[in-house]
Image (spheres, coloured by chain):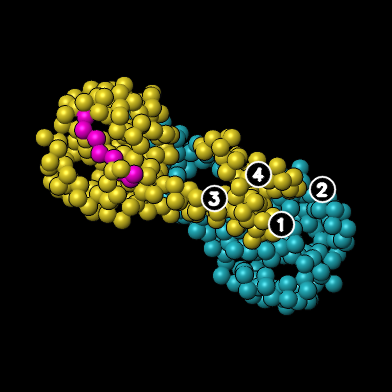
Chain colours: A yellow, B cyan
């Protein structure tokens, strides 16, 4: 019987990729609004290449974009871009059914956890802004655990909690980071998105059948 | 005749100190909401001491507070504090008459500038969030100029713009950083706040009399 449910955050509890795309486009619109004389589509394409090169966690994307464009006195545009980017990223909303389902799961006695890759403070920031931080017993982030999600990650988390894998289910959107390693540990696993479920509304029923 | 008006930002265009105090109190409330078991007033007093010690531009205030309190796994509280702090600081509003007065000054042919101490990107961020960045011909920040507001700062700015000091007025809240050095350069000066004006609504009339 399932007692413990582990959730991934990004693209599982909220549409991370949609918000990231919107945040970048809003950042570009803000720079143009402040007088940057470039085409929005061209800026977006350049920005995506920079993000790929520097990694998505760098805080130098806009600095580098303006450097490549040889913009003099770029501070006003950096300020505009970062403000618009953050305004969007700090207005994230969960998938609409998520808060209701998390509450129902708790009321049915399940213990809820988060298992996520990333920076500990950044991942907590998302849970707080989504308004769902208090639903979880604890939050396990790869940075704190010392390894990315893998069989070893889940073995360590379950051993810390002194719970058995067959009483646990991992719910996430990534086959390689969520589903495969959770199953390797002996946990159940449910995929959100492609070839999985697109909504958590039936999650209580699905859990009863595991 | 006055042609050029220079504005300070903090406590001149918006009530910086009020928002800073609110932001810190909101940060403390957010940590308590997430389960930090300390008294709000005690936390606020400790925080003010840390800000005084590390300087107001440090980004380690909350990290240091939680370190002093010996809180284990502090990331959730840092995330909560920083999110609440930024939510407040990014919701700054100008003194209510400011946008209307800036627009009227432009319509009367005055050229508006900003002259401010601080970090260039942070000062631009404030103007953008206040919704008044486009009113100014240019923004002069001590970091970019290479010196804090002083006779030398204003001499350099006026020389760059090729304008005469007696056609200029500096408007700011600080006797030592705004009024005294502007006058030393030969500019006019108007003080906002204590022993000055508390509202810019009569600024057009005041300027005509200079």
How many marks do you count on the picture? 4
Q: What element carries label 4?
A: helix
Q: Where is residue B188 in the image (x, y as percent from the top left)?
A: 79, 64
Query: Which labelled disc corresponds to residue A37?
Result: 1
Q: Give the letter of the chain under mark 4.
A: A
Q: Residues within 10 Å of mark 3 (few under 14, many from 20)?
A: many
Q: What element carries label 2?
A: helix
CA gap, disc 4 to disc 3?
12 Å
CA gap, disc 4 to disc 1?
13 Å
Q: Is residue B106 left or right of residue A153?
A: right
Does the CB distance between marks 2 and 4 fall below 8 Å? no
CA gap, disc 1 to disc 2?
33 Å
Looking at this view, is A177 or A156 the one in front? A177
Q: Give the residue number, with chain letter if any, for mark 2.
A: B152
Does residue A193 belong to the magenta stretch? yes
Q: Residue at x 28, y 22 (%)?
A: A156
CA gap, disc 2 to disc 4?
33 Å
Q: Give the residue number, with chain letter if any, for mark 4.
A: A65
């Amino acid at each position: 019987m399932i007692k413990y449910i582990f959730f991934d955050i990004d693209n599982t509890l909220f549409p991370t990729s949609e918000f990231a795309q919107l945040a970048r486009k809003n950042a570009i619109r803000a720079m143009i609004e402040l007088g940057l004389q470039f085409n929005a589509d061209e800026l977006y394409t350049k920005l995506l290449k920079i993000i790929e090169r520097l990694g998505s966690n760098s805080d130098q994307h806009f600095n580098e974009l303006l450097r490549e464009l040889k913009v003099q006195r770029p501070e006003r545009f950096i300020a505009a871009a970062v403000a618009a980017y953050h305004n969007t990223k700090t207005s994230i909303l969960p998938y609409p059914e998520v808060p209701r389902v998390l509450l129902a799961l708790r009321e049915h006695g399940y213990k809820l956890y988060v298992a996520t890759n990333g920076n500990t403070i950044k991942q907590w920031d998302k849970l707080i802004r989504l308004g769902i931080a208090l639903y979880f017993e604890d939050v396990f982030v790869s940075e704190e655990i010392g390894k990315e999600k893998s069989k070893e990650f889940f073995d360590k988390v379950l051993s810390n909690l002194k719970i058995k894998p067959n009483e646990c289910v991992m719910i996430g959107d990534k086959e390689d980071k969520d589903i495969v390693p959770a199953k390797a540990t002996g946990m159940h696993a449910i995929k959100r998105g492609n070839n999985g479920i697109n909504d958590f509304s039936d999650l209580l029923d699905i859990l009863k059948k595991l």
